[in-house]
Image (cartoon, helix red, strand yellow):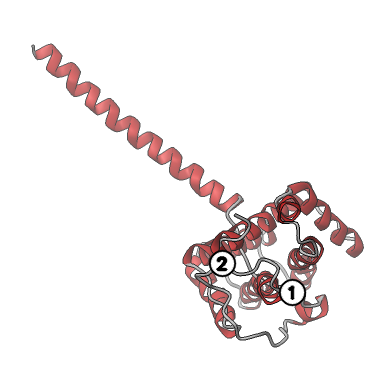
Amino acid sequence: MKIFKILYFISVLLVINLSTFWHDINLFVTLENVIQHKYIPILWNKKERNLAEGGLEDSSSSNIRTHQRPDLLDEEILLKISECSELEYMSTKEIVYLITDNNKNPEEIINNIGLIQSSILGKLQQENIELTHSVLWNMSLRIAQRLGEIFRSGPLQREEVQAKLRVYIVEPITVSHIIENSFSSSDLLNIKCTIYNLGTIRNEIAKRISTKKISLSNFLLNNMMYRISMFFNDIFDMHGLLQ
């Protein structure tokens, strides 16, 4: 009888330990998936000149968040979606210069999600754009990933930073082009195929990169592709679009 009790006790311990083990693995995998894939929304066709100069054109004061299913092809909604992508870039740029101009430790800033969220939240509030907490969180993770890529080799001089930012400005520009091209169609299936097709997104990025004569590794190109894909996925999920 004692043997059965001992075996039972050992079995319980094994179950508990295995549960803990798998929980830790799932946490790790989830975090990796979030960082690699769950990235979200922000901004529209504001010409490259405005992005480079750090200025935003005046936008409508309408709120992007709604509890009703908006018209997918509503021009104002599409404008706000693209605008969100632009603001994400502007926040990335702001934090990059915060690190460079103040000799901050890049790693400390990258790990400070609260600071990143404050930066993007301030810009969203200025444009009267309200996003869900999950969308804002994913947006912050995307910014953190960009910062990690930019400062992968350590601190940079301002000239080096400016060269890096020329690469990342391609993301909001690509978002703008995809929206402009795919949403000219009233066929929802065609729209889905366009914005969720990683190959299409990758090709659009490559086009923008080639016009700038920038050399980009496949690693960075793929990261951009996934960020844009999840940008669309999360923002449309928030609105209940394309369902």
Mark 2 Cα-neighbour bin, 10 Å: few <14, some 14–19, many ≥20 = few
- What amino acid is at disc 1? Arg
Disc 2 versus disc 1: distance between alpha carbons?
44 Å
Instruction: Pick the residue in front: 183 or 4.
Output: 183
Point out the residue furthest to the left here.
1
Left or right of 52? Residue 234 is left
Q: Please, what secondary structure does the residue beneath circle 2 have?
A: loop
Front residue of 231 and 220: 231
Quadrant in which the N terminus is drawn: top left
Quarter of the figure with residue 21:
top left
User: Residue 226 or 159: which is nearer the viewer?
Assistant: 226
Q: What residue do we see at 54% from left, 73% from top?
A: 65
Say whether residue 107 is visible: no
Residue plotted at (74% across, 48% down): 198
Q: Which mark is residue 158?
A: 1
Pointers 2 and 1 in contact (C-beta within 8 Å): no
Q: Position of residue 142 (x, y in %)?
A: 61, 60
Amino acid carrying label 2: it is Arg
Q: Is residue 160 left or right of residue 70?
A: right
Q: Residue at x 59, y 65 (%)?
A: 106
Residue at point 29%, 28% (across, down):
15
| Local crowd size for mark 1, using a 10 Å CA cut-off: few (<14), some (14–19), many (≥20) | few
What is the x, y in percent for residue 61?
A: 61, 86
Residue 210, labelled with which disc? none
Q: Position of residue 57 (x, y in %)?
A: 73, 86
The answer to whether any part of residue 232 appears in the image is yes
Say what secondary structure mark 1 lies in: helix
Numbered disc in front, either 2 or 1: 2
Disc 2 target residue: 69
Where 202 falls versus 168 (above or below)?
Answer: above
The quarter of the image holding the C terminus is: bottom right
